[in-house]
Amino acid sequence: MRFLITGGAGFIGSHLVDELLSSGENVVVIDNFNLYYDPEIKWKNISNAQENPNFKLLEGDILDKDLLNEIFSSFDIDILVHMAAQAGVRGSIKNPELYTKVNVLGTLNLLEMCKKYKICLLKVSRKIFFIKPTQFIPETSSNCH
């Protein structure tokens, strides 16, 4: 399978990338390397992945519809894992327009691409990493269609 991971150079995303690559999956990452999260740390996060032939990194933004269309039409994506976001409560108060653009319109762009290219979307919330699940849902490909 080929995964597209938005925000895949971040802390959680890069760990997912490493896990998928170690399982033999093909992974495409799009990340904008903005200054909110030190870009040097992000480059370090994905340094091992860059040596893997099943890995492709694209530096870009989920607000760029033309780029997204090019990615979705060029790569045979099976599953999108959407982890890109403008994070941080303080920043959202100081610059609500940026947060709305990235977190709402960027997500809408991805939803439109998933609909157009008939791709399964997995939206990841950081909250899931800090709660105890009460019910497990089997991860089968039939859940994506």
Image (cartoon, helix red, strand yellow):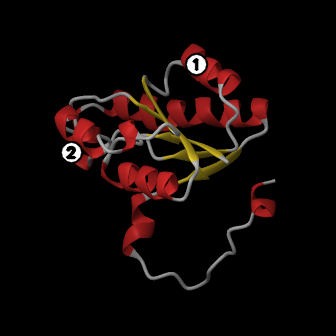
Describe residue 88's horizontal placement relative to residue 97 as left or right. Answer: left
Residue 105, relative to residue 64: is it above or below? below
**Residue at far top of view:** 66
Q: Specify the label residue 65 is tagged with.
A: 1
Disc 2, SS: helix
Q: Nearer the viewer, residue 46 or 131?
A: 46
Residue 124, relative to residue 115: is it above or below? below
Disc 1, SS: helix
Residue at image coords 48%, 57%: 22
Q: Residues within 10 Å of mark 2 (few under 14, many from 20)?
A: few
Q: Which amino acid type is shown beneath numbered disc 1?
A: Lys
Q: Which residue is mark 2?
A: 90
Location of residue 95 (image quadrant)? top left
x and y percentages locating residue 106 in the rendered image: 51, 31
Residue 100, relative to residue 13: is it above or below? above
Q: Which amino acid type is shown beneath numbered disc 2?
A: Arg
Q: How many marks?
A: 2
Disc nearest the viewer among 2 and 1: 1
Specify whether residue 124 is in view: no
Residue at image coords 49%, 23%: 63
x and y percentages locating residue 87 in the rendered image: 31, 44
x and y percentages locating residue 135 in the rendered image: 61, 83
